[in-house]
Image (cartoon, coloured by chain):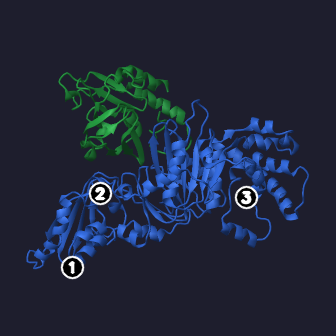
Amino acid sequence: MFRTLLRTSPLVARPSARLFSTSRAVFNSTSHKLNKDSHVYKYLQEGPSTIKYTAEHEWLAIFKDDSAFVGITTYASEALGDVTFVELPEVGDKVEVGDTIGSVESVKSASEIYSPVAGEVVAINDVLESEPQLINTDPIGNGWIAQIKLSDPAAIESSEELLSAEEYENSLSEN
Amino acid sequence: MFRHLESYIRLRPLVLNRTAQRSLNNVQLPFQDDLTAADSDDFGLSDFQHYQESPEIVAKRQELSGFNPTIEDATSNNISKVQEEPISFEEQTKLKRPAIFVSKLSNPYTNLAIEDYVYNNMPIPTESGSNFNRLMFYTNSPCVVIGKNQNPWKEVNIPLLNSLHIPLVRRKSGGGTVVHDMGNVNYSFMTTKAQFDRFQFAELVVEAVNNCQESPHKIQVNERGDIVTVTDGINYKISGSAYKLSKGKSYHHGTMLLNLRLDILGKLLSRDENAIGKVESKASIASVKSKVTNLGLSQLKFIEVVSRGFTNSFGKNETIETHEADEYDQNELFGLTDFVEANTDRSASSFIIDETTELPDEIIKLSDELREWSWRYGSSQSFSHEITNHKLGFTITFHVGKHGVVESFELQFNDPQLLAQEKIEESFEFLQTFVEKGSVHYRGSDIAGFITNDMISDWVGECIDNTV
């Protein structure tokens, strides 16, 4: 997806395609599972009911109370590099699928984050304002960005854009 | 790539001589239309057919009164051909092929809005192998441009900026603060998110410039993706880069210091904390200070060589279309087949934006949004600004929250014996009332208006942004 975001130095020759395919092997071995020690997992005693992913590399942990935590995946966090700033939405913001809910700045790049679901922002992870590096150290866990109260919980199962862990990991190795 | 450029240089005099002959002797050659078409398509010069010379260049050329081998000469005869198929700016932005835009406008808000519009309207290719990449050039009248997530009070000498009537602009990409003037050219390379690469376009610029004999400096890309030149072992930055990634798309834009007023740059970006106060903001991007210098190349030349680099790397392969359009093979006719195969099978559509270009309403709307105080200043993260009045012996610290709203302020008296303390405190009472209502924005004129002592209010206004 991000072809050579990982390059940290300019190359004289540019075998970027090959470079990227080697680094992709690393991605495949990384886990895209929710960190069980994180605040997100412990939000409800029984843990989340479903975890979904998007092609834009966001994850979604849905709980029984029809709220969902949203963040970016390990793949996206590694591709972006050191995160230096996180722009968060505001509690009370109403969002539709695909709306911008914030952005992440890393190495002079501003990357938009999109909401994979419709609903209302009920909580934001304001720890990220002082500790943006949480996006790198625990992207699928304490690096969550916002909690959204779903306006249409039934849409989750019928959505074709929300991928299971297996589908998401397959999409990474296909590219 | 190298081979292409070499052969380009080798064969270039051929076409120029022919053009020279025509323009000097005003000889109407037979098949002139066919010849001009070949000039444009076969030599990869079609990018420049919309290019218009600035009045200075025209004057200079007339002064030299005679033949001056510029790209414009080589393509000036093509204007009639272009006018046959006028294409609007909006149509150009939607083209499903690589395209170059050169803005001749100098308003920074308009240029950033055009850049945004071109980016938002760039189609995303569905099949792999094709690209609808965009390259845009623009030069802004003097302004200071901060990164999306920066704090202007912290990065820029705002009082000086406002006293010189230089606009402060916040862009939508990340990174640090840069100063623009007419001696700078901004380039903006847009592609898909999948093709995003921090270094690719900077490397293309470096190669294009280093292959240009007129360039006074050899340049290279550093580890931050900036373009530098090394003199006596010291790195001097001549171009800064910033990036934006959004759904399916990305851009890399950068400044290129050609002949910038570097003395003014230094003054605008240095803050004397003793005089205008200290700004603390945990959650904002700090600029990385670098030594800078100018490349010293002309704007026209820079745009020309980088456009050619873009066309060689990303231009659409048009060989088949060109041949279909021709009644006979002109390349063979003029013995140029080798040259054509080596170079000119790639082209990119180009478009010049000037005062006569009809811009979509959306661009006007975007540029108005960029002009809003709420975007330029108000979208900064929470910060505090501590200013000390040495004459009266007190310090005031403002705490500014989201949307640029003052949350609170506190006074500190450096001399406990100060007789005027009570009077000074009194002059801030009115401000206190309004700050508590949450209705005061961090603008010098707004704050000063609530301070009841004229001397203190002028001083606070000056320290904030020199609007009293």
- Is label 3 or label 2 in front? 2
Q: Foreground: B241 or B81?
A: B81
The reply to whether the C-beta atoms of the residues labelled 3 and 1 are less than 8 Å apart is no
Give whichever of discs 3 and 2 has the lower sequence position.
3
Q: Which residue is mark 3?
A: B72
Q: Residue B463: x percent and y percent?
A: 29, 70
* Residue type highlighted by circle 2: Gly
Q: Chain of mark 1?
A: B
Q: Which residue is mark 2?
A: B404
Letter of the chain shown green in the rendering:
A
Q: Which mark is residue B374?
A: none
Compared across the picture, whether B156 is left or right of B116 comes to: left
Q: Does residue B365 show up?
A: yes
Q: Which residue is mark 1?
A: B391
* Residue type highlighted by circle 3: Glu
Q: Are marks 2 and 1 on the same chain?
A: yes
Q: Are marks 3 and 1 on the same chain?
A: yes
Q: Foreground: B441 or B168?
A: B441
